[in-house]
Image: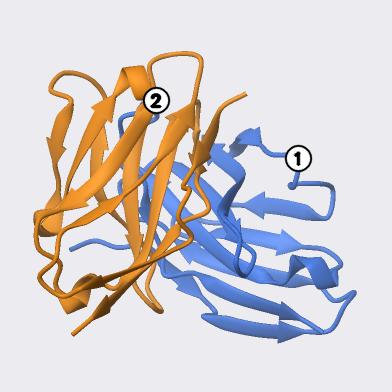
Chain colours: A orange, B blue
Amino acid sequence: AQSVTQPDIHITVSEGASLELRCNYSYGATPYLFWYVQSPGQGLQLLLKYFSGDTLVQGIKGFEAEFKRSQSSFNLRKPSVHWSDAAEYFCAVGAGYALNFGKGTSLLVTP
Amino acid sequence: EPEVTQTPSHQVTQMGQEVILRCVPISNHLYFYWYRQILGQKVEFLVSFYNNEISEKSEIFDDQFSVERPDGSNFTLKIRSTKLEDSAMYFCASRASGANTGELFFGEGSRLTVL
């Protein structure tokens, strides 16, 4: 059965520091992978997605993610975090009609 | 920019009462979804809807739940007799195409509190 694991429940980084949020998946076929962000009181916004091709994908707000098949990972990165990046981040695997989400990682940005 | 809108933003109800959550998907989208997120837990798929019928549903979506597209714009989730464990944030989403590659656009959610 497919599953998505986000090992880190909370992460705290200083503004300007680099960020990496981890995501591991278990899926029998070639996965369609997504990262969504949820700001307080907001809905889920798509940051980026991977379907095929270049394993390094660029998204909005300066985020990127790298698909590593050998590690079953799709980690999200940003070279320099801004205070406005504080939010909940969800990794998801697409299959059939539905998306299967991880439990999310809450990002706190300190001055 | 087109967006998915949901009402109400927050609803408090007594256990056993019926609740209807409403969603207006993006106008040219054809696939509609409900997800829920219990506080502190992950976002869970409930149901998908296409061409006026359910295309897929999860184990969570039992007989207490139903969905409907009563007109050309609204997409509703009904919980027939609410339980305490139905307390959650419910997200509506829509997609233009059925392809797995199509982006899901989410609403801001409706928070349901069952007392």
Amino acid tagged 2: Ser
Q: In the rendered view, does A103 fall on the left or right side of B29?
A: right
In this view, A82 is above or below A31: below
Pinpoint residue B113: horizontal percent, then vertical percent.
70, 80
User: Residue drawn at (25%, 51%), measured in percent from left and top?
Assistant: A20
Q: Which dot, 2 or 1, sits closer to the camera? A: 2
Dot label at residue B59: 1
Q: Which residue is mark 2?
A: A72
CB atoms of marks 2 and 1 within 8 Å? no
* Residue A95 visible somewhere in the drawing: no
Pinpoint residue A17: horizontal percent, then vertical percent.
14, 66
In this view, A55 is above or below B42: above
Q: In the rendered view, does B32 fall on the left or right side of B86?
A: left
Q: Quadrant of residue A67?
A: top left
Pinpoint residue A77: horizontal percent, then vertical percent.
20, 49
How many dots with numbers?
2
Q: Quadrant of residue A89?
A: bottom left
